[in-house]
Amino acid sequence: MTPTPSIFDPVSTPAFAIRELSFLVFGITGVIFVVVAGLAVYTLVRFRGRRRAGDERREPPQIYGSTQIEIAWTVVPLLVVVVLFLVTARYIYGLERREVPAGALEVTIVGNQWWWEIRYPGLGIVTANELHVPVSDPSRPTPTFLTLQSTDVVHSFWVPQLAGKMDVIPNKTNRMWIDPQTPGVYVGQCAEYCGTQHAWMLLLVVVHPRDEFDRWVAAQHAPAREDPAVRAGYQLFLSLACINCHTVRGTPANGVFGPDLTHLMSRRTIAAGAASNTREALRAWVDDPASIKPGALMPAMKLSSDELNWLTAYLLTLR
């Protein structure tokens, strides 16, 4: 079961730091709220019903300034801001100064409208919308370092249980790191409005035990499987514009504008979380992408029912 994303349920060092800072901010602002609200309630209760006959025609005593009060409401907020600034700067400095240890996993994540391309330069793997990383043992941390880029507009990478938000900006490279300490599946989201399907630009982070991650890497290195039973769908795929946008390793398809489909069916969702990766959803996506994700750049191929069945059958073999 995929956990609900929450900064209050962290599993990674940057997320733990963010939760600690949040508790401090909530504590300080909570005290301020209690003091201000308490004074307001005290004033309302203490001085209600004090008006006497004729008071509405008499101006109350006027006080023109109090040096002590003015100093207090200037110095106290200033001290609060300074404390919050210094603590926040300390946390940011500590997180961003993390050095890359030898053997750390490096991943490049590229934001597109509206999906995520995920590259593992050191492993020779390219996938989409699912980030797979090994679990990090707190006694021997093995962090994953992320390089964030964009091909079009400003996006924002955010997996609340793993780290804070980081903008993904065209022509600029940003960096962040995570060290998830609990295996599982964690939900991420583009956190910067990037177009009509911003809300459906999701991301899954799958944290594996080390041996399971190694098996995933080995499976991703395998080329697309050839299945004579779906030959008609394979030939149809190669005859369509699909090969101009998508890559299926081991075939003539080598497009780079859309997600790599070599292991399409190993993913839990399609269209960056807009639909579960099932036969029915996949067929509907191929038939008319706009019915699932309006504004998606993938065109409808206007295929017949038989052609849709052939092409879907072929895609289902891409594991």
Image (cartoon, rainbow, N blue to C red):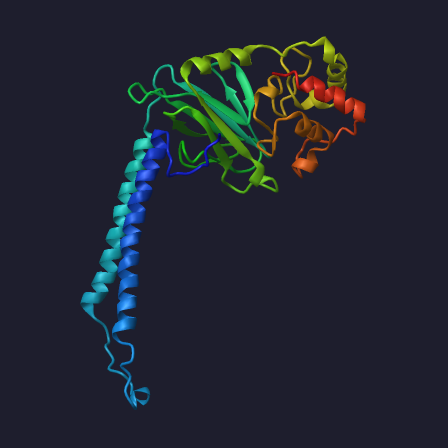
Q: Residue furthest front?
A: 1
Question: At which x and y percent is residue 165?
Answer: 43, 37
Going 73% across and 11% down the picture, which residue do you hit?
229
Q: In which quarter of the image is the C terminus?
A: top right
Report the number of numbered marks.
Answer: 0
Question: At which x and y percent is residue 65?
Answer: 23, 72
Question: At which x and y percent is residue 200?
Answer: 58, 37
Q: In this view, does 68 lie above or below 198?
A: below
**Quadrant location of residue 243?**
top right
Going 30% across and 62% down the picture, which residue do you hit?
37
Does 246 sit left or right of 171 as displayed?
right
Question: At which x and y percent is residue 163?
Answer: 40, 33
Q: In this view, does 57 lie above or below 146?
A: below
Going 67% across and 9% down the picture, which residue do you hit?
226
Does 266 sit left or right of 68 as displayed?
right
Q: Is residue 200 above or below residue 245?
A: below
Does 314 sit left or right of 116 as displayed?
right
Does 275 sit left or right of 73 as displayed?
right
Q: In this view, does 118 lie above or below 159?
A: above
